[in-house]
Image (spheres, helix red, strand yellow):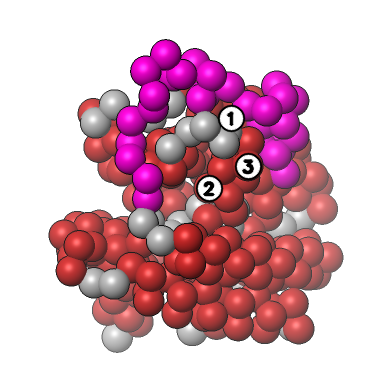
Amino acid sequence: MHDIAFIFAGFFVGLVVGLTGVGGGSLMTPILIFFFGVKPYMAVGTDLLFAAFTKMGGTVKLARARIIDWRVVLHLSAGSIPAALITLFILNHVGPASAKAQSLMTTTLGLALLLTAAATLYKALRGKAAPVTVVRGQEVKAATPRHWSLPLLFGAIIGTLVTLTSVGAGAIGVTVLMILYPLLPLPRIVAADIAYAVPLTLVAGLGHASMGSVDWPLLTKLLAGSLPGIWVGSHLMSRIPERVIRSLLSVLLAYAGAKLIAL
């Protein structure tokens, strides 16, 4: 019975990701903790690889459409991946299953979910995305940050957040990119966010796996449900009011975040 429930959970998260583009981590990790009683460190580790595999398909699709600005991906990765490795080193030293690490993970996850809820609601109120194209002659300028150090700094913060909670590379990452790259159209920001999340979640997920923080049979079941869910969600996207779904999601994420902080 649990096997079917895990596959259904994967399908549900995949469906929402396909419909809205909201990062799966902000949904899957709280579902695993609250509904299935999975320990936070195991939920985070498993979800990181779940996110890496689900976002790989989206990255390939976006790369073929040529809407990924690889300079932006490189800027963020230069800050986020070293930060993820440092965080993994500290987690390994402390012990991911230790009471101190568990408390840090749940509190940070709660804060990350509250931030994601705010970012999701902001995007819902903002409405539909702008055109994908950049004004001719402005391509390099659009992919240049306000200051060269900012992507490194924010990348490091997101890298740490993602490694501790598996949340942060979705709605939070998009909001950060909107601030750092004001000339870049929103669809290109979303594309860059999905693309840089792949190496980040893969590095963080494999790091957790090396510490025994990944449940491989569980990961297989979640992927078995999520991949068809993403396909269905992406095909229903134009028929279902995205603003309503995002608004409801922001309320659910805020509730889950507050509950985790109170643990």
How many other residues sit within 10 Å of disc 2, few (<14), some (14-19) or many (≥20)?
many
Query: Which residue occupies 36% across, 56% down?
Result: 128
User: Residue at label 2?
Assistant: 174
Q: Secondary structure at mark 3?
A: helix
Query: Which residue occupies 29% across, 63% down?
Result: 19
Q: CA distance from mark 2 to mark 3?
A: 9 Å
Is 177 colored magenta in this rendering?
no
Of the image marks 1 and 3, the number of the one nearer the N terminus: 1
Res 6 → quadrant = bottom left
Amino acid residing under circle 3? Ile
User: Residue at label 3?
Assistant: 179
- Point out the stretch of residues depicted in magenta: 129-157
As drawn, the label of residue 31 is none
Q: Secondary structure at mark 1?
A: helix
> Which image quadrant: the C terminus?
bottom right
Of the image marks 2 and 1, the number of the one nearer the N terminus: 1
Res 150 → quadrant = top right
Res 224 visible: no
- The location of residue 171, given as percent across then percent down, is 53, 55
How many other residues sit within 10 Å of disc 1, few (<14), some (14-19) or many (≥20)?
many
- The location of residue 179, given as percent across then percent down, is 63, 42
Amino acid residing under circle 2? Val
Res 20 visible: yes
How many other residues sit within 10 Å of disc 3, few (<14), some (14-19) or many (≥20)?
few
